[in-house]
Image: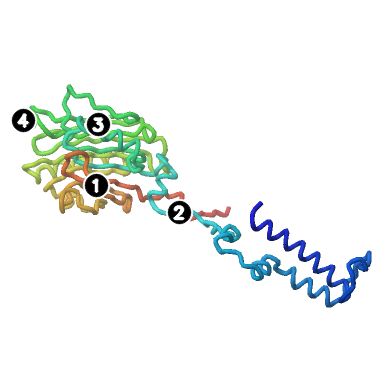
Amino acid sequence: MTVLQLALGWLIISGLLLQIELCLEPGQPFSAMPSRLTYSRDHLLQLSGLASDPLKTFLRDTNIPPELLRGSKRKRIQRKRGSRGGIRHRLRRRGCRLPLPAITLTNARSLWNKTEELCTLIKSDPDYQRTSLFCFTESWLSGDVDFQMDGFNIIRYDRDVRQTRKSIGGGVCMAVNGNWATNYTVRETECCKHYELMTVSFRPHYLPREFAQITIILVYVQGPDFNLAAARITESYNRAVAQTGEQPVFLLGDFNKCNIATHLSSLEQYVTTPTRGKNMLDLCFGNIPGAYISKPRPPLGFSDHNVILLLPKYRSRLKSEGTITKKY
């Protein structure tokens, strides 16, 4: 039995005794109390004033240490109204059912020795868990290297030694989350000593009504002729747009000193944070205005490029536009 219960019990007994005293005349014995109690107006007013807040009256008249009264104070619970906003909360709520894929872009500088780190990040880091598509440049993979990630389909295009005359480095690779898409088509691959390119079209499990497919062009431009690389990459982008019929086409990768923005001035560039030191080398271009926001993450292993998270900011037409009422 707590101190508060004892206090309330004592208060009830005191109230009964007070009622009995009010019913007796001064000096009248207890045996003279009538069998039927009667109350006057003044008695009722006194009792109502006492019973208005009996706990407060009891605490005022008694000296109870404050540490014993902590449990008697009820905490008011504030009710949360509405829902949390923000792009990351939207990604967590919708999972892989996104209008555009959540992309993780980085220059890995060798993938085969970072497999365990990637698997650990996918299991423990929410940003990597919600990634729909990993895009790696400088994969450094060759035909005798088996690179796998649990739950992901690997699409890779290794460096052609005969075309580049380089046996080490290069290569582009995509890891597709099986929960986002399993239907894809490799439309174009190209490798020369100036750049490497791979174009893939995806048909995800979920797409908004206005999109039929999403095309990703992943490039790695190593030079030395960056002007020639920019012209060839522009031609590949225009071919992808012509093949897909004005559907979303995104061009991303490690461009180094290649100024592709002068050739594709109508596209929007989504990466706004430095990717290597103070320089922005890993970029993403697209034909959807305001499609992504970029968030930097630490590099993988000993890579000198930051990991860039491209979080989809685009909202489908069905949710962004108001309801249209037609009258017939």
Among numbered discs 3 and 2, the one appearing first in the sequence: 2
Disc 1 to disc 3, C-alpha distance? 24 Å
User: Up-down: is 33 above or below 151?
Assistant: below
Label 2 secondary element: loop
Disc 2 to disc 4, C-alpha distance? 53 Å
Q: In the image, what residue type sits under mark 4?
A: Arg
How busy is the neighbourhood of tag 2: few (under 14 within 10 Å), some, or many (20 plus)? few
The residue depicted at 19 percent of the width and 24 percent of the height is 145
Q: Which label belongs to residue 5? A: none
Q: What residue is pinned by disc 4?
A: 165
Whether tag 1 and tag 2 are in contact, CB under 8 A, the answer is no
The residue depicted at 37 percent of the width and 50 percent of the height is 314
Q: What residue is pinned by disc 2?
A: 84
* Residue 92 x, y percent position in the rendering: 41, 44
Whether tag 4 and tag 1 are in contact, CB under 8 A, the answer is no
Label 4 secondary element: loop
Q: In the image, what residue type sits under mark 1?
A: Cys
Label 3 secondary element: helix
